Image: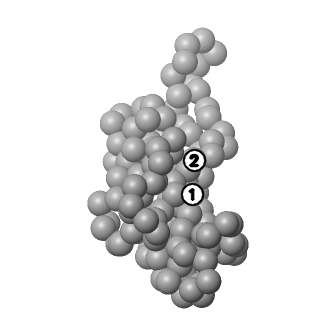
Amino acid sequence: MNTKDIRNALKSRLVSANIGPNRAHPNVEPTGGRPFFEMSFTGIDREGGTLKGNEILSETGQFTAVVVVDQGGGEDDALDYADAVAALFPEGQRITITDGEIVIRRPAEIRGGYPTDADYRVPVAVFYRAKAD
């Protein structure tokens, strides 16, 4: 199990759902205009199973998909997209990865929207734990 597999599986779930906007992957500029999803990850905790070596047995983290729409058009469109993203990651969902599995730990959180420059952003936080087989 490795971090790349975990992150790619979560990003793939969002991308393959084809729920609308373009996607901005971490460290990649968004293509096309608004609306789009801006994806990012925050690691919370990793556990190994041995006192020597680098084997990772579990990783806990947060996947965030920020819905980005034009500012000034109200928040309804952003919230519709946010609800669709949250529905992709229900509590208890299991996603198979190489040498392990990702489990969604609790319902996705749709956080308060905020304006930035010409954008209006609504973050959707997905909390996961990946475990090795």
Q: CA distance from mark 2 to mark 1?
A: 6 Å
**Type of amino acid under label 1:** Thr
Q: Verify CB contact (< 8 Å) between mark 2 and mark 1.
A: yes
Q: Nearer the viewer, residue 42 or 130?
A: 42
Classed neighbour count for the residue bearing mark 2: other residues with Cα under 10 Å, few (<14), some (14–19), many (≥20): some
The label on residue 77 is none
Badge 1 is on which residue?
64
Residue 44 placement: quadrant: top right
x and y percentages locating residue 81 in the rendered image? 47, 76
Q: Secondary structure at mark 1?
A: strand
Name the residue located 40 percent from the left edge and 55 percent from the top edge. 31
**Type of amino acid under label 2:** Phe
Which residue is at the far front? 118
Q: Is residue 98 visible?
A: yes
Q: Secondary structure at mark 2?
A: strand
Badge 2 is on which residue?
41
Name the residue located 38 percent from the left edge and 48 percent from the top edge. 9
In terms of sequence position, does the residue under pointer 2 or pointer 1 come before the other?
2
x and y percentages locating residue 18 in the rendered image? 30, 67
Q: Is residue 126 visible?
A: no
**Quadrant of the image for the C terminus?**
top left
As drawn, 52 above or below 38? above
The tally of labels here is: 2
| Left or right, residue 33 beside residue 71 | left
Which residue is at the far top? 52
Name the residue located 57 percent from the left edge and 57 percent from the top edge. 64
Q: Nearer the viewer, residue 2 or 76?
A: 76
Name the residue located 66 percent from the left edge and 39 percent from the top edge. 45
x and y percentages locating residue 119 in the rendered image? 60, 70
